[in-house]
Image: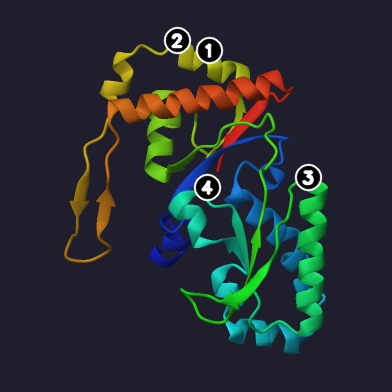
Amino acid sequence: MKDWKVWLETRMLQESMDLYIKGHDTHNQIDDVDDLAHYLKYNTFDKMWSKMTPEEQEEIRKGGSMHHWVISPDGSFYKDGTPVINFYTTGFTPERKKQMLQGIEFYLKELGIPMGQIQTNTSNMYGGEVIRIPIGQIPKKDTPARLNMSNQNAITIFRDLLNYPEDPEGGFFGISAADLLIKIDNLPDYMSQVHQRDPYDKKGKTGPRMIDFGLSADAIQQRLDIIRQIAQWAVKNGHSELYVA
């Protein structure tokens, strides 16, 4: 048995799992402004980081831009859907800032996303300089749905309900998309009720507080519907295998 620290780091702190299609690059799947921000950060800042001097890296760390993900959607996106990307620049040298903006402009153009007039001001939430970049509509593409589940919900659905073996290190691998569709379609309706789980909040004399928000029969069915959509997309687009990790 693993000691408490190892178990906590490898299992307890990995609080969720995603359903993936083997061979499909979700990293480049852009469905909304959140996805776009991650894509831009990966292709600009993340690739630039290793080329920076230790002094440059330290200034950016001290400036706090990394705490705000460097590139992220503006708060207005979460409030009313306004499509604006923020680039937090504190700690960047003028040359690196210029390279970042050139990279952002390049990738937006490559993706066919219009870029509006940028504005430089002070972040209302974090302080420090922020460059706000209004963007146009993100082109719609045929992409699969996404599903993120808590560890316990993933186990309930894939192990307990669909009878897939759990990997010793966690997760479920080698899931046939076609087989998964058959299992879901042949699943009796009452099975969602059998595997529903009541919420609980427990804390013993020692150890962590354990909170589980439960999983209703309707919530199970909603997740099964999304899983079906993902499996159907996989089959339609020539992908045969899925995995949960």
Given residues 232 and 90, the one toward you in this image is: 90
Q: Secondary structure at mark 3?
A: loop
Q: Residue at x 28, y 63 (%)?
A: 208
Which of discs 3 and 4 lies nearer the camera? The answer is 3
| Whole-number angstrom distance, CA of label 3 to CA of label 4 | 41 Å
Q: Position of residue 108 (x, y in %)?
A: 76, 53
Q: Secondary structure at mark 1?
A: helix
Question: Mark 1: few, some, or many residues within 10 Å (few <14, many ≥20)?
Answer: few
**In this rendering, is residue 206 above or below 28?**
below
Given residues 23 and 45, the one toward you in this image is: 45
Q: Residue furthest bottom?
A: 55
Three-letter code, disc 3: Gly
Which residue in the structure is indicated by mark 4? 169
| Whole-number angstrom distance, CA of label 2 to CA of label 1 | 6 Å
| Tag shown at residue 112 | 3
Label located before the other in sequence (4 or 2)? 4
**In this rendering, is residue 160 above or below 201?**
above
| Whole-number angstrom distance, CA of label 4 to CA of label 1 | 27 Å
Question: Mark 4: few, some, or many residues within 10 Å (few <14, many ≥20)?
Answer: few
Viewed as shown, does residue 203 lie left or right of 220? left
Q: Residue at x 52, y 22 (%)?
A: 228
Which residue in the structure is indicated by mark 2? 186
